[in-house]
Image (cartoon, helix red, strand yellow):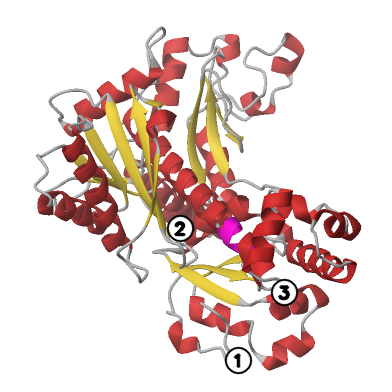
Amino acid sequence: MPLSSEFHPVDIPAKPGVYVYRDRFGVVIYVGKARNLRRRMSSYFQPSRLKTAEPKLRSLINSIHEWSFEVVRSEDEALILESKLIKAYAPHYNILMRDDKRYLLLKIDWNEKYPTLSLARIEKPGNFQYFGPFPQGSALKMTLEFLLAHFGLRACRDSEPDEETRKHCLKRIINDCCAPCIGKVTPEEYRARLDAALSVLDGNISELQEELDKRMKEYASAMNFEKAARCRDISANLAAVFGRKNRKFENPALPGEDPGMAAVKDLAEKLGLKTPPRHIIGFDISNILGQMAVASMVVMRDGRPDRSGYRRFRIKTVGQSDDFAMMKEVIQRHFSRLMQSGQPFPDLVMVDGGKGQLSSAIAGLVEISAPPLPILGLAERNEEIFLPGESLPVILSRHAPALRMLQALRDEAHRFAITFHRSLRHKRIEHSLLDDIPGIGEKRKIQLLRTFGSVAALRKTSPEEIAKKIPGLGLKTAQKISDALSAGKQ
């Protein structure tokens, strides 16, 4: 909303979330996260802070023309949303995150003779398996070090080291590695250790926590408080990073099996669908900036994106920021069109969100008397799958093919919605730049756009060239246009 002469903290909830600041041209200039939105956003508009702020912060505060926010459920969720928005909009003042910093992943290279867990930031194609991302980077690193030692997994870079390297391997000497490279365990025994570690990644941490708790008490009784504290910290990190229960480990697709169809079959099995959902559509709402609300629909066929079926929607009937009502509108519009044209329905519908979004989508289908079809909601916080009529969500393994396919569909819908939102914003900005130049009326604006094609092309043209190509336009006015467009680009 526009920034009035006085900022009113009462308008902001005291909840975790992400806030967005824009300049007078509508350009996103800063994205931030907060545990308490009201407290954090209020701090920018305190007169005392403006006087004592460093130049960069003072420049940011003076540039803020409009603000908006998005409430989330946790600080971790705010971290992830902040990262996504920074990457999408590249705000000028987010200098500290302009290096494209990413959250850590855990990685397994299945090409290695003795696969192990390692850290990564980017998913690469190949016979790799990834887990994450994990916002708690330091906790993840400490937990990974513990898991490698606890299960005796290989920690060296080379899966088959030479004799000299094996001879001086410190992990082998202190028994932190089961040394499969020298035959101390068989490949089958090593795989059993790896599967046990993967089970922890799956959220099965209770047994390990019980063992750590026992160790902690023993160390504390022996007055060894440093080791006791380490056991306590590792247990806490396990809960923070992998704290999900009752998950089942899934192996990757079999050699020669199409990964997309393997995911489709896996989803049908996990959700008890009568037939594999070869045609899936996913919906997402983009209302992050509070204006020009849009929605996206993306399509997967046989587990792979089908971009020919993508659709974009401008929200028409919902004026306020109400994601539930927006989801209902989009569902009704799309399926009404399918029913009127006689086109086939998809095998499965996914909406981005939890119970609220799912209920809104179902209500929309009921109101237009659409025939029943499988539908689910995917809540991003814990990747919970909500189904109609079920009070508890379905929890799949983080690395189950079915979940990874739904995540890819959800992320693609989110990307497509944000791209649409950004293009609309740029169009609005371009038109408003010409509208805001004194002395440039509607006819002159149309003449300029027809002659030069776009504001972007006009911006690159010299004042002399503008005056030359537009009859009756003097050099003074052309210079005024050039100056205004140059200022709008900043």
The boundaries of the magenta stretch are: 425-429
Q: Residue at x 75, y 61 (%)?
A: 489
* Residue 226 visible at all: no
Depth check: 378 or 237 in front? 378
Task: Classify residue 137 as left or right of residue 208.
Answer: right
Depth check: 211 or 110 in front? 110
Q: Nearer the viewer, mark 1 or mark 3?
A: 1
* Nearest to N terminus: mark 2 or mark 1: 1
Instruction: Please tell me whether residue 427 belongs to the stretch shown in magenta.
Output: yes
In the picture of the structure, the residue carrying the numbered disc 2 is 77
Task: Classify residue 483 as left or right of residue 110.
Answer: right
* Residue 341 visible at all: yes
Of the residues shown, which amino acid type is indicated by label 1? Ser
Numbered disc 3: secondary structure? helix
Measured along the vertical axis of the image, is residue 402 above or below residue 186? below
Residue 476 on image: x %, y %: 88, 71
Q: CA distance from mark 2 to mark 1?
A: 32 Å
Q: Assign the magenta stretch its main secondary structure.
A: helix
The disc at residue 5 is 1
Q: CA distance from mark 2 to mark 3?
A: 25 Å
In the picture of the structure, the residue carrying the numbered disc 3 is 60
**Corner quadrant of residue 269:** top left
* Nearest to N terminus: mark 1 or mark 3: 1
Q: CA distance from mark 1 to mark 3?
A: 16 Å
Numbered disc 2: secondary structure? helix
Q: Residue at x 17, y 39 (%)?
A: 340
What crowding class fits label 3: few (fewer than 14 Cα within 10 Å), some (14-19), or many (20 or more)?
A: some
Instruction: Please tell me whether residue 488 belongs to the stretch shown in magenta.
Output: no
Which part of the image, by quadrant, shows the C terminus? bottom right
What crowding class fits label 2: few (fewer than 14 Cα within 10 Å), some (14-19), or many (20 or more)?
A: many
How many numbered badges does the structure rendering display? 3
